[in-house]
Amino acid sequence: MPRRPILILAAIVLLIAAGLGGYAFLGSADHRPSGSGVALVGGPFSMVDQDGKRVTEKDFLGKYMLVFFGYTYCPDVCPTELQVMTAALDQMGPEASRIQPIFVSIDPARDTPAVLKAYVGNFGPRLIGLTGTAEEVAAIAKAYRVYYAKAATSGSGTDYLMDHSSIIYLMGPDGRFVTHMAYTTDAAKLAAELKETLRTSP
């Protein structure tokens, strides 16, 4: 056989071998892309509740957590969402006992435990308010992928508004993220989604 066809044939064989080798390498258990499929939302935290008690995520294990981030001076979004959460849990009846609603302040400078206590009392006895130092608030907000910042058009001193995410998070009894609900979710839809989650969980 002439030399040139032999060289071409050898090159083809080498390319096929390299392709098969690369396929085997990428397909092996050690080199496949890995991922748990679980959203990286939530995690350890240490905060203070409306009674001045230090609490962590471990205090809520065994129950679902319905979590919303906001602040007590919020003029509309926060009270609206907390009313939706309260109404949804009221609609659920006894099943609501498996869920702990939580309001996390992103305004620690003004939202002291005493301020939180007066505020969360407007939304029934179930709601727990959490606050802490600026560092503790930043840590839990980062864990939950929450955006917050003082509004650029705010006033000075203690007269200011806060920009923040408006999402309700549902965390499982093991502390892991289950799902989230948008700001537009009404009480009836939220109650239905919560009931479905409880129905399909242990």
Image (tube, rainbow, N blue to C red):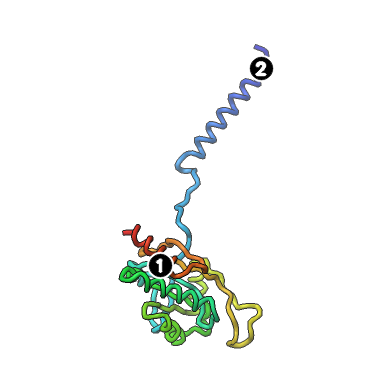
Q: Residues within 10 Å of mark 2 (few under 14, many from 20)?
A: few
Q: Which residue is mark 2?
A: 5
Q: Residue at x 50, y 82 (%)?
A: 72
How many angstroms separate mark 1 from mark 2 (CA)? 73 Å
Q: Are marks 1 and 2 in contact (CB under 8 Å)?
A: no
Dot placed on the residue nearer the N-terminal end, 1 or 2 = 2
Q: Position of residue 108 (x, y in %)?
A: 51, 81
Q: Is residue 26 above or below residue 198?
A: above
Q: Is residue 43 visible?
A: no
| Residue type, numbered disc 1 | Ala
What is the number of the mark on residue 191? 1
Query: Quick one: 139 or 121, which is closer to the camera?
Result: 121
The secondary element bearing badge 2 is classed as: helix
Outermost residue, top direction? 1
In the image: residue 74, left or right of residue 122: right
Q: Position of residue 76 (x, y in %)?
A: 54, 79
In the image: residue 52, left or right of residue 143: left
Q: Is residue 151 above or below residue 179?
A: below
| Residue type, numbered disc 2 | Pro
Q: Residue at x 35, y 69 (%)?
A: 92
Report the number of discs: 2
